[in-house]
Image: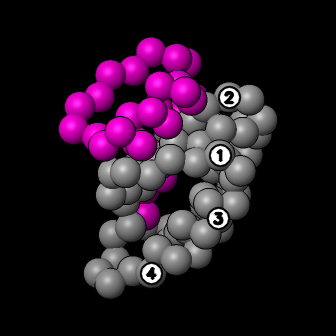
Amino acid sequence: MKTYLIGYDLNRPHQDYVDLISAIKAYATWWHYLDSTWIIKTDDSAVEIRNNLRQHIDSDDELLVVQHEGDGAWAGFNKEGSDWLKQNL
């Protein structure tokens, strides 16, 4: 499985994140500790992930899907969040 970083900005005030978040959580392995940043593990490509999530955002929103290849550093996360990153990056 590959690891992907997902980031988004939904630009309309009071926009509903429920459908987008549900679509991200549909991936079997996911991590979410920062507001609009998620990490998932999947065999899908970045384009497939983007196409899946794109249907849950508006045309003026931004969505970024980037494959992550192993090196990472972080600070300030609790043990659970830090342990997930250590095991999955």
Colour approach in the figure: one colour
Residue 57 against residue 8 in the figure, above or below:
below
Q: Is residue 73 magenta?
A: yes
> Is any part of residue 7 visible from this angle?
no
Label 2 to label 1: alpha-carbon separation = 11 Å
Query: Dot 4 corresponds to which residue?
Result: 16
Query: Dot 3 corresponds to which residue?
Result: 23
Q: Secondary structure at mark 3?
A: helix
Residue type beneath disc 3 = Ala
> Is any part of residue 27 visible from this angle?
yes
Q: Are circles 1 and 4 on residues that touch, CB within 8 Å?
A: no
| First reached walking from the N terminus: tag 1 or tag 4 | 4
| First reached walking from the N terminus: tag 3 or tag 4 | 4
Nearer to us: label 2 or label 1: 1
Query: Which percent across, then down, holds residue 62?
Result: 43, 56
Query: Dot 1 corresponds to which residue?
Result: 29
Q: Residue furthest bottom?
A: 14
Query: Dot 2 corresponds to which residue?
Result: 2
